[in-house]
Image: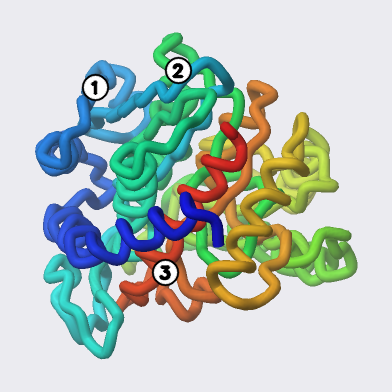
């Protein structure tokens, strides 16, 4: 190892317990989204990062814009350190999390450490990378790295709601325009592509009637049943499409919410569905939406007294490689393989993330951070979410080395 590499490794080893403590404090502050009342977490994160010696910019998102995006409050944080003239590299992690749900063996806000794993909501996705990126930058500063460029931390709060008032807002508002971006991810893969996601709301309307005389009404639930049958038949066909990108797989289709009806003894006059359609990078989002709308309308066509309204709730485009992302990915892959002692592949993931907002502006972007081998290992988005605390140190070291390489 070079002298710089040895110094970075030694500094991060010496501050490993501090890094773990930072993550623990971040996990202890709830930031569930929904409901998306995340300003308090931003304030606590700002306090903790300021105590590390960073100058933390707080950028509150206007209340109306939060509301339009299904949230109550969000304050995005930006930290900048200019080492010298050169490119700007943004390191982005999100502090909002899904609600804990049931089935936990540990306090979801307790940050308990058992057998080397920290348990808690956000421990892996992705409060961990607040700590990863903060300590990577601090290590570069404290070891006196001589670099040509600037490092920014973008700590945002709306990934679970789509990301429009996180990274996208920072760029739209002119707060930042980086040349490269690394977004939160796991440690055993350098991610260059991910799926897109389309959410549709479907409202099926009929006419209520007494259950003793169902023929006098128009049953919205019966019509919805026909739509569901068509959707699930279509879902089975999606397995025939497989992405050429390792780790992506096939498109997915899920009906996640169903609401409706008035009472047991009343013919339902309204039923609503919420549909989640995951798109592989090779698919065209407009075509996918058009095909799904046509499928739903055909299933309800000709049903007496039935009407259907379809609303797009969210469209997240897939993450696709742009610019010289191959160079960025290769640099991180090289250092990840060296630090972790095994070949770390470049791949895709069947998720969608904030990272796509950077690529939409032509910014080469990958996903890499602290996390175990798989989503299942992390218990991401389910009970007992967890992270091996050793990966905080290792991921910070990989990021620090990669940034130093990019800005050498």
Determine the CA span between mark 2 and mark 1: 12 Å
For the C terminus, give its image quadrant.
top right
Residue 57 numbered mark, or none: 1
The residue that appears at 28% across and 34% down in the rendered structure is 71
Q: Mark 2 or mark 3, which is nearer the start of the sequence?
A: 2
Regarding residue 91, the answer to whether it shows in the image is yes
- Estimate the x, y position of residue 192 in percent, counting from the top left: 70, 49
Nearest to viewer (mark 3 / mark 1) = 1
- Estimate the x, y position of residue 276 in percent, counting from the top left: 58, 53
| Nearer-the-camera pick, 6 or 29 | 6
Q: Residues within 10 Å of mark 3 (few under 14, many from 20)?
A: many
Q: Mark 1 or mark 3, which is nearer the start of the sequence?
A: 1
The residue that appears at 66% across and 38% down in the rendered structure is 317
Determine the CA span between mark 3 and mark 1: 29 Å
- Number of marks drawn: 3
Q: Mark 1 or mark 2, which is nearer the start of the sequence?
A: 1
Question: Callout 1: helix, strand or loop?
Answer: strand
Question: Callout 2: helix, strand or loop?
Answer: loop
- Estimate the x, y position of residue 289 in percent, counting from the top left: 73, 39
Determine the CA span between mark 3 and mark 2: 29 Å
Residue 291 numbered mark, or none: none
- 34 relative to 103, above or below: above
Label pair 3/2, CB-CB below 8 angstroms: no
Which residue, given by chain and number where applicable, does mark 2 sit on? Answer: 176
83 to the left or right of 89? left
- Estimate the x, y position of residue 37 in percent, counting from the top left: 19, 39
Which residue, given by chain and number where applicable, does mark 3 sit on? Answer: 380
| Nearer-the-camera pick, 40 or 406 | 406
For the N terminus, give its image quadrant.
bottom right
């Amino acid at each position: 190892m070079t002298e710089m590499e040895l110094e970075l490794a030694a500094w991060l080893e010496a501050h490993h317990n501090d890094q773990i403590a930072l993550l623990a404090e971040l996990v202890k502050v709830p930031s569930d989204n929904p409901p998306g009342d995340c300003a308090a977490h931003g304030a606590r994160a700002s306090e903790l990062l300021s105590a590390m010696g960073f100058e933390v910019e707080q950028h509150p998102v206007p209340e109306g814009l939060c509301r339009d995006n299904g949230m109550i409050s969000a304050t995005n944080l930006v930290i900048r350190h200019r080492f010298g003239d050169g490119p700007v590299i943004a390191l982005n992690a999100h502090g909002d999390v899904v609600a804990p749900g049931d089935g936990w063996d540990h306090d979801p806000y307790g940050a308990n450490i058992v057998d080397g794993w920290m348990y808690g909501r956000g421990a892996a996705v992705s409060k961990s990378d607040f700590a990863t990126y903060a300590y990577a930058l601090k290590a570069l500063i404290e070891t006196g790295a001589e670099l040509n460029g600037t490092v920014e931390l973008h700590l945002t709060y709306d990934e679970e709601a789509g990301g429009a008032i996180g990274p996208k807002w920072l760029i739209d508002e002119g707060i930042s325009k980086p040349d490269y971006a690394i977004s939160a991810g796991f440690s055993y893969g350098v991610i260059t592509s991910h799926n897109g996601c389309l959410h549709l709301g479907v409202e099926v309307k009929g006419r209520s009637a007494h259950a003793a005389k169902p023929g006098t009404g128009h049953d919205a639930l019966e019509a919805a049943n026909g739509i569901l049958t068509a959707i699930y038949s279509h879902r089975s066909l999606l397995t025939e499409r497989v992405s050429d990108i390792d780790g992506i797989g096939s498109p997915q289709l899920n009906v996640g919410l169903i609401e409706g009806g008035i009472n047991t003894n009343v013919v339902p006059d309204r039923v609503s569905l919420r549909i989640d359609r995951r798109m592989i990078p090779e698919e065209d989002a407009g075509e996918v939406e058009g095909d799904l709308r046509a499928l739903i309308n055909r299933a309800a066509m000709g049903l007496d007294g039935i009407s259907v309204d379809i609303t797009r709730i969210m469209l997240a485009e897939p993450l696709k490689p742009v610019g010289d992302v191959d160079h960025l990915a290769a640099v991180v892959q090289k250092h990840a393989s060296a630090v972790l002692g095994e070949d770390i592949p470049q791949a895709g993931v069947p998720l969608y993330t904030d990272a796509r907002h950077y690529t939409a502006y032509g910014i080469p972007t990958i996903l890499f951070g602290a996390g175990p081998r798989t989503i299942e290992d992390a218990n991401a988005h389910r009970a007992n979410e967890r992270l091996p605390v050793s990966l905080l140190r290792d991921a910070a070291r990989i990021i620090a080395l990669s940034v130093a390489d990019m800005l050498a």
